[in-house]
Amino acid sequence: MAKRLLNMTSSELTHLTKSGVLEAIAGSEGRVLASECIGITQPLLTDVTNAEFAAAMGADILLLNMFDVQQPVIQALPHVEPAEVIREVKRLTGRLIGINLEPVEDRIAAENDDTIWKMSKGRYATVENARRAVEMGVDLIVLTGNPGNGVSNQAITDSLRSISAAVGTRVVLVAGKMHASGVVGEGGEHIITPEDVTAFVDAGADMVLMPAPGTVPGITTEYIRQLVSHAHSLGKLTITSIGTSQEGADTDTIRRLALECKMTGTDIHHIGDSGYVGMALPENIMAYSVAIRGIRHTYHRMALSIRR
């Protein structure tokens, strides 16, 4: 039996193959925590990257949002060549690293140009950017959309199909949305449907991402439970995601969301990057971890040296 991800050392985590990542996550039985981080904003601890901070609070996977593979920037990261940025984050944190890529239409990107979520060339969900990400050492590529960027499920499916054909054997591919992403008609239960899950899987997804129950109006535990069961029946893993700034709520709310996600049967628990801006409130990362796996595994992940 493959070793569970929640028990792995840094040297084991950062040298996993794609199949090894999937097996280690599945073997952890819903006790894997992914923390989303933004590297281009001022870090919460000024001279410590948000990725390091999130890892220190117990995250197993670090998902870099708004990461530009053509002009990579992680504030507070020691200077390295652009091609080595991901590997340097891995070296400092000892964690699996994922990035978001977005299949955004140029027209919509222009409309959103004056917001924090404005697009840059290296964030588009293209084959070229996916190949760059793989060469940089990324473990997961998540095809999704940031607020207001107008990413539809059809656009995710189309980009996923081409990216899967190009790099699908080398990297874990995740598809889905945690909110409507500015698409009229894809709110509530229409953010993701059973038909979308099937389409993502057919296009090459290894994991399907969906909103955590209680984070989006109309998204209930039972509804997400059905989607998780459907994805599992197709042989794929799932990620439930807090992407509605509730990562900045009180710890009691976080615990409740965590347990609702646990009841859906999800494989990975995702907590977003907007506690303030840049990462979840650090106490909420730890609270989420404790809720889904207790203090023993939480402290083990926090205390385990990255030199092991």
Image: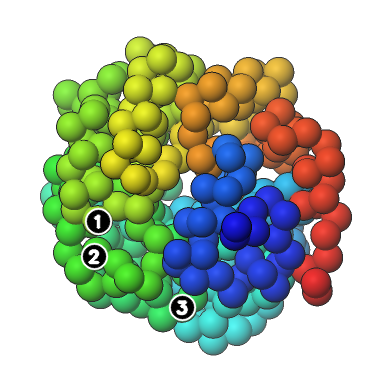
Name the mark on residue 136: 3
Tag 1 secondary structure: loop
For residue 163, which numbered disc appears in the image? 2
Label 2–label 3 contact, CB within 8 A: no
CB under 8 Å between discs 1 and 3? no
Q: Quadrant of the C terminus?
A: bottom right
Q: Are marks 1 and 2 in contact (CB under 8 Å)?
A: yes
The amino acid on which the numbered mark 3 sits, given as a three-letter code, is Met
Quarter of the image for residue 51 reads bottom right
Q: Position of residue 89 (x, y in %)?
A: 62, 70
Quadrant where the image shows the N terminus: bottom right
Amino acid type at mark 2: Ile
Q: Residue furthest front?
A: 1
Q: Which residue is mark 1?
A: 204
Q: Residue at x 61, y 26 (%)?
A: 258
Q: How far, Cα to Cα, is label 1 from label 3? A: 21 Å
Residue 114: in sight, yes or no?
Answer: no
Residue found 59% across the figure and 74% down from its top:
15
Q: Earlier in the sequence, mark 2 or mark 3?
A: 3
Amino acid type at mark 1: Gly
Left or right: residue 98 compared with residue 88? left
The mark nearer the N terminus, 1 or 3, is: 3
> Which comes before the other along the chain, label 1 or label 2?
2
**247 left or right of 210 in image:** right
- On the image, the x and y values in percent for residue 72 come to 47, 72
